[in-house]
Image (tube, rainbow, N blue to C red):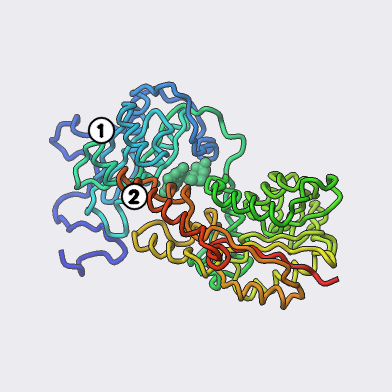
Amino acid sequence: MSPDDRNPDSLETKPASPGIPDEPEGSAPAGRAAAEFDVGKPVGPTPPMDFWRAVYERRSIRKFKPDPVPRELVDQLMHAGIWAPSSCNYQMWDLVAVDDPVVNRRLAELSLQMGNAPVNVIVSYGRDFSEDGWANVQSASALIQNMSLAAQVLGLGTFWITQMGDREKVREIVGLPYDRLVIAVVAVGWPKFAPKQGPKRRPLAQVAHWNHYGGRPIPSSPRPADWASDLLAIYQRARVLNGLRHNKPRPWEVRAIEQVIARWFPAGAAEPAGERRWLDVLPCTGIVSERLARLCPGYRFEVAERTPEVAEFVAARVRGSIRAWPDPDPAAGFHAPEPGAYDVVSCLYRLEDLAPADRATLFNDLARWVRPGGRVLIGYVSRASFHDWTERMRARRGGLKGVEYVLSPDPNIGPFESLAPSEVEALGRAAGLRVVARHGLQAVPQPEEIAFRARNFGPRKQGLARLLGRALGALERLPGVQTMRGRFRYLLLERER
Ligand SMILES: Cc1cc2nc3c(=O)[nH]c(=O)nc-3n(C[C@H](O)[C@H](O)[C@H](O)COP(=O)(O)O)c2cc1C
């Protein structure tokens, strides 16, 4: 078929077959044994559940009871799966359900995500088949969603795994031929508990449009300059309210915060509780704020965020009072931070995701909120460090990249760029703040970080990575290296009295 024979709107159009009456795709041609084709009826009991409840109550379940799942139920899920639409109804999917603990352990070595459920269903599709418009991936995805909804009706829990480590190794472990591309893994088991509250969704009005797109798309660029601040707020709100899965503190980042607090706020723990006020600005996930509040119980913590939802989320972690900014809503209990009221105002690892023009505005706000003689604590990832270099290496390896996966310094929410120390200090001075002290930490990747980044490598490479970590550790102890080349930089500034 020449390209001209194709319907421009459909990559699926098949050659015309004059004289043959149209029959629905996938129906059994006359004369073939009916047994060759599936009849499309559930292969097990079907507990009643309203369609809408199944759609809205399904949640990704990641903690399971150890109880086995009867194979008949897994078959029932897979059967619901194969009744999903597929491109041209070619059904080039092949599934392998793994309930053998030995095989599941091998899968879990590739990614811990496959170590959660008693059953992992490997979903594959023809590798070079129906690639146009990613129809192979789309078809497999439709199958997965059917399986997930069927599981919901049966009282089973599922979660969809793309982070499976090396998908070719997954394929080999379960004996699928090269011709099959592993698209995803569906973990299946009996939920350990029903999540009380699911991740939230962006409102329909922001997402759906009639006849003509009338919105402003959230950028898919990791460059802060490409992000308007209101879009960043929408994106971060979506990510933060999405269940915190990507927001786990990394031990080396936590250690850096602990060290800097011990250095500059040693009395934080000793102060009489609640007498002094600390405002943490743009805490985002609250990982760092939670740590600050624990290290400095002598302060009363408040948080300032761009949206009430995120402020509320963080305040619950920090047990602080809530401040929304820049759109306070007193009726809803959200107020703007009080000017000149705070003994300490901190902003840790958030300047990096702001567009350059917004950084200056933020510094002005920090300076406005701190009391005369009060301190402003800034933490950021320095451009004069190994950070950008390792990010480039990761990108070259074809590793995770782009907006969602920019890891910095914890899995970052949104755009990110490291900052030149001179630029940050200039912003502080322009806002009327005086530099009191500077500090640098982690001039080389920490051993835990190296182990973490190498976790999907083989044992030999992991050993090499550990050795590298030890050698780099020696380098870090050389005088001046931390201050000059630390990835994490901290600034202590003071508002003139
Ligand atoms: C294409 C796709 C890939 C996903 N990959 C993973 C994954 O690798 N690991 C994981 O824990 N969850 C994964 N999920 C689950 C999502 O995180 C989850 O669906 C989302 O947070 C919404 O939560 P909910 O399913 O409870 O509504 C994936 C979902 C989809 C659709």
Q: Which residue is rendered at x = 48% and y = 36% of the image? A: 62
| Mark 2, secondary structure of its residue | helix
N-term-proximal mark, 1 vs 2 = 1
> Residue 183: x, y in percent?
32, 47
Mark 1 or 2: in front is 2
Q: Which residue is rendered at x = 66% and y = 73% of the image? A: 425
Q: Which residue is rendered at x = 39% and y = 28% of the image? A: 118
- Position of 271 with respect to 257 (left or right) is right
Q: Amino acid at mark 1?
A: Asp
Along the viewing direction, whichever of 126 and 233 lies nearer the viewer: 233
> Residue 138: x, y in percent?
35, 51
Q: Is residue 144 above or below residue 392?
A: above
| Mark 1, secondary structure of its residue | loop
- Position of 12 with respect to 380 (left or right) is left
Query: Disc 1 versus disc 2: distance between alpha carbons?
Result: 52 Å
- Position of 168 with respect to 266 (left or right) is left
Q: Is mark 1 within 8 Å of ligand 1?
A: no
> Residue 192: x, y in percent?
52, 27
> Residue 48: x, y in percent?
48, 26
Along the viewing direction, whichever of 467 and 251 lies nearer the viewer: 467
Along the viewing direction, whichever of 198 and 88 lies nearer the viewer: 198
Residue 38 — which label? 1
* Figure label count: 2
Q: Which residue is denoted by mark 2 in the rendering?
A: 464
Residue extending farthest to the front is: 479
Q: Amino acid at mark 2?
A: Leu
